[in-house]
């Protein structure tokens, strides 16, 4: 009988997820899961050809049964030691309902279910977004509801009803604010088994999706954003992976329940610099 390896699960087969997985996956079994199996297959092939032990898997993170099948498949391979969630849809990709179902409910579902099975000493990161930092502050009670409402009741919250969501960007911002709050609440539960979970909020990162946006109808908006941020440029996936590697490793052992904004200073410029809305 072959020795079972530690298992790393990546949800969301894109450039950011792959960059993170390549930093931490050597010597482990990796399951790359995506709602498009061809996307998972492409990332699995690239990583396999680079010497990693990777298998693709189809998952719909907004469906609890699908998530539980993924977890079952992971547990058959070995102990779940690490979880990386880079799945989601963007404001230009999906309607309000889908953004809330995938980015908000789906992330909460993943954090809850993987928290139940992560091994002692396990670690996780979920990819949020700078968008969650741009929205006006919610009330402490609204933040608490986003953080602690049972997952299956989240989409019933009054603040998430269609009449209270202005557009897809607002839905995305609410989802990403919720991601950060859920990570804080889940970190308390994960800590009971010595496991850690954090979130990363990237700005504009060059990926195929971002290139579509930059070359599309909203391209001038994005070009203006990175021209007027302190870094003066967009980021790349490996710069997100630099921080994720710290959070997932023993070097980040004292970090849990935290969110890391990696946006070249765009949010700082949005509040206090040339990206302020009144200047644009």
Image: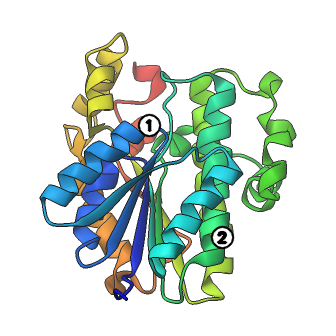
Q: Label 1's element?
A: loop
User: Badge 1, how many Cα within 10 Å: few under 14, some, many 20+?
Assistant: some
The residue singled out by tag 1 in the image is: 36
Relative to residue 51, is residue 238 depicted above or below?
above
Relative to residue 255, is residue 15 depicted above or below?
above
Q: Quadrant of the N terminus?
A: bottom left
**Whether residue 219 can be seen here:** yes
Find residue 212 and report its horizontal and vertical position in percent: 30, 21
Q: Label 2's element?
A: helix
Using the image as rendered, state which of residue 151 and residue 220 is in the foreground: 151
Q: Say which residue appears at 67% left-offset and 38% top-offset.
A: 101
Sequence-earlier tag: 2 or 1: 1
Q: Say which residue appears at 65% left-offset and 70% top-offset.
A: 186
The dot on residue 186 is 2
Report whether 74 appears left or right of 185.
Answer: left
Name the residue furthest left: 50
**Whether residue 264 can be seen here:** no
Find residue 122 and report its horizontal and vertical position in percent: 48, 81
User: Badge 2, how many Cα within 10 Å: few under 14, some, many 20+?
Assistant: many
Find residue 184 and report its horizontal and vertical position in percent: 63, 68
The dot on residue 105 is none
Find residue 48 and report its horizontal and vertical position in percent: 20, 59
Report whether 141 appears left or right of 67.
Answer: right
Scheme of image coloration:
rainbow
Q: Say which residue appears at 66% left-offset and 25% top-offset.
A: 96
> In which image quadrant can residue 69 be found?
bottom right
Q: Say which residue appears at 34% left-offset and 53% top-offset.
A: 17
How far apart marks 2 and 1 lie (CA) works out to 28 Å
Using the image as rendered, state which of residue 7 and residue 223 is in the foreground: 7
């Amino acid at each position: 009988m072959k020795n079972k390896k530690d298992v790393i699960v990546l949800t969301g087969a894109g450039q950011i997820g792959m960059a993170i997985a390549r930093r931490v996956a050597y010597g482990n079994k990796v399951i790359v899961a995506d709602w498009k199996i061809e996307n998972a297959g492409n990332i699995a092939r690239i990583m396999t050809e680079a010497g990693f032990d990777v298998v693709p898997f189809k998952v719909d993170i907004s469906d609890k049964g699908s998530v539980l099948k993924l977890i079952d498949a992971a547990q058959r391979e070995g102990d779940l030691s690490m979880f990386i969630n880079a799945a989601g849809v963007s404001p230009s990709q999906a309607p309000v309902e889908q953004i809330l179902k995938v980015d908000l409910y789906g992330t909460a579902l993943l954090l809850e279910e993987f928290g139940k099975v992560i091994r002692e000493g396990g670690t996780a990161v979920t990819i949020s977004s700078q968008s969650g930092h741009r929205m006006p502050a919610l009330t402490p009670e609204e933040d608490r509801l986003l953080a602690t409402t049972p997952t299956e009741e989240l989409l019933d919250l009054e603040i998430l009803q269609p009449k209270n969501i202005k557009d897809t960007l607002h839905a995305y911002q609410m989802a990403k604010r919720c991601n950060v709050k859920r990570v804080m609440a889940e970190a308390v539960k994960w800590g009971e088994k010595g496991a850690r979970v954090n979130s990363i909020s990237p700005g504009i990162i060059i990926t195929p999706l971002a290139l579509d946006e930059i070359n599309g109808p909203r391209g001038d908006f994005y070009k203006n954003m990175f021209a007027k941020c302190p870094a003066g440029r967009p980021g790349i996936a490996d710069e997100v992976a630099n921080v994720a590697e710290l959070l997932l490793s023993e070097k980040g052992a004292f970090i849990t329940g935290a969110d890391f904004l990696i946006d070249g200073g765009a949010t700082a410029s949005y509040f206090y610099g040339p990206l302020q809305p009144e200047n644009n």
